[in-house]
Image (cartoon, coloured by chain):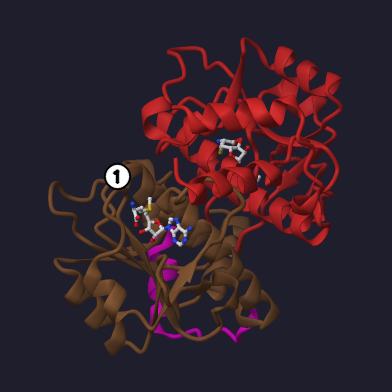
Chain colours: A brown, B red
Amino acid sequence: MSRERFETFKKALRQRQPDMTVLTDKVHKAQNISAILRTAEAAGIGHIHMVRPERGHLVYHNTAGGIGRFTSQTVHDTIEEGCSALRQQGFTLYAAHWSERAIDYREADFTRPFALIMGAEKRGLSDYAAAEADAHLTIPNMGLVESYNVSVAAAIILQTAMEQRVRAGLYERPLEEDDHYWTTLFEWMHP
Amino acid sequence: MSRERFETFKKALRQRQPDMTVLTDKVHKAQNISAILRTAEAAGIGHIHMVRPERGHLVYHNTAGGIGRFTSQTVHDTIEEGCSALRQQGFTLYAAHWSERAIDYREADFTRPFALIMGAEKRGLSDYAAAEADAHLTIPNMGLVESYNVSVAAAIILQTAMEQRVRAGLYERPLEEDDHYWTTLFEWMHP
Ligand SMILES: C[S@@+](CC[C@H](N)C(=O)[O-])C[C@H]1O[C@@H](n2cnc3c(N)ncnc32)[C@H](O)[C@@H]1O
Ligand SMILES: C[S@@+](CC[C@H](N)C(=O)[O-])C[C@H]1O[C@@H](n2cnc3c(N)ncnc32)[C@H](O)[C@@H]1O
């Protein structure tokens, strides 16, 4: 463990955004989950939520470019369970979804505590998540495609969230060197 | 063919940006190529360039969510060939790449004619493309990940390119109803 590596860990941990997360609604392709995990971590998200897809389990560990070690995941059995857990923790629920009530994703306020719900590859968002969400966010486009790949859509939205939070100074919050901080640093340092 | 569908085609065709393209430098995963194709089309890119990966060929047709029909591709055997073709067509070459001379992607001028070169999944950008590029664009992040998935990186950069072009009015250029326009419309209408 070099001094430099230690400083990198401290900086990343300081920039973590515990009040921002992602909930995948039965996204099942390993490559998509892995890409979402990497993109989320890049925006400072240390913990993500996933609803288990019907078939198969979530195999993402080996494909996440080693980033799995620096993030943690909660796997929910149902979308109901996932939404209710996030509600209890005070997150506003934004669903990436096209609907009559959808707003342009750039109009959403990403500086408040929020969870971004992403729909599955073929099936899209579940009816339950669509009904439960506080807002539907849509990414308008200039072409003929109907939708983006799910990890691409997550990245476009999270990039805007990150920029809003940079402007609001949320990556420069004073560091609380509490138990969680030291435990995490310790874990990262001892693979 | 409904009147509505016809109008959708006309609008999309009018918004196409012939002076913007992507060149993939041996990107080989079908899912990534497909995601890049969709994202590019969403930004108004009707034609993309790809350098054939060493092994296997490019199988993207079935996975591109049907968008292959509305876009065309040139496959080059080598990166040298790809770069030189784009140079001849007057494109500035931007490579998504981290290096000493890299600039923040938001500082690049995307309103000029440009091709965005994307590196391969594991290997990244080839030395040739890195040397040949007019500028290297990097996407800074707040976490510990070293890189984004290639289709995610392409999307983040193209989204900014699209926004710059919206502001510059480039999606509102007067429509030239030339041979290319009518041929393309005809093709789209008769699958
Ligand atoms: C491949 S899409 C699902 C497509 C599905 N056929 C549908 O119509 O919902 C997977 C997920 O990516 C997100 N997504 C894709 N394109 C989007 C867009 N333009 N706006 C908002 N979310 C999008 C949504 O969460 C969606 O459920
Ligand atoms: C998965 S990355 C390749 C990683 C490879 N190990 C390397 O170090 O280059 C695939 C491609 O995505 C693009 N990319 C990924 N993250 C990027 C970033 N933060 N900035 C610019 N381009 C990036 C680059 O074109 C890169 O070659």
Residue annotated with mark 1: A29
In the image, A188 versus A49, the foreground residue is A49
Q: Which three-letter amino acid code belongs to the residue tagged 1? A: Lys
Residue A189 screen position, x and y as percent: 44, 59
- The part of the image, by quadrant, that contains residue B21 is top right
Q: Is residue A93 above or below residue B109?
A: below
Q: Spot the residue most to the front.
A: B3
Quadrant including the C terminus of chain B: top left
Give the image quarter of residue B97: top right
Quadrant of res A2 = bottom right
The answer to whether residue B167 of the structure is visible from this angle is yes
Magenta stretch, overall SS:
helix
Question: Which quarter is ligand 1 in?
Answer: bottom left
User: What residue lies at 81% left-to-right and 25% top-to-bottom?
Assistant: B132
Q: Say if residue B124 shows up in the picture.
A: no
Q: Give the percent coordinates (x, y) of residue A67.
A: 42, 52
Nearer to the camera, A58 or A72: A58
Where does residue B48 sit, x and y in percent of width and height? 63, 29
Instruction: Pick whichever, B136 or A99, lies toward us.
Output: A99
Give the crowd class for mark 1: few <14, some 14-19, many >=20 residues within 10 Å.
some
Residue A102 location (% of width, % of height)? 46, 74
Q: In this view, does B4 lie to the left or right of A124?
A: right
Residue at position x 24%, y 58% in the image:
A26
Q: Which residues lie in the magenta part?
A: A172-191
x 53%, y 64%: residue: A157
Tally the marks.
1
Does residue A149 appear left or right of residue B165 in this picture?
A: left
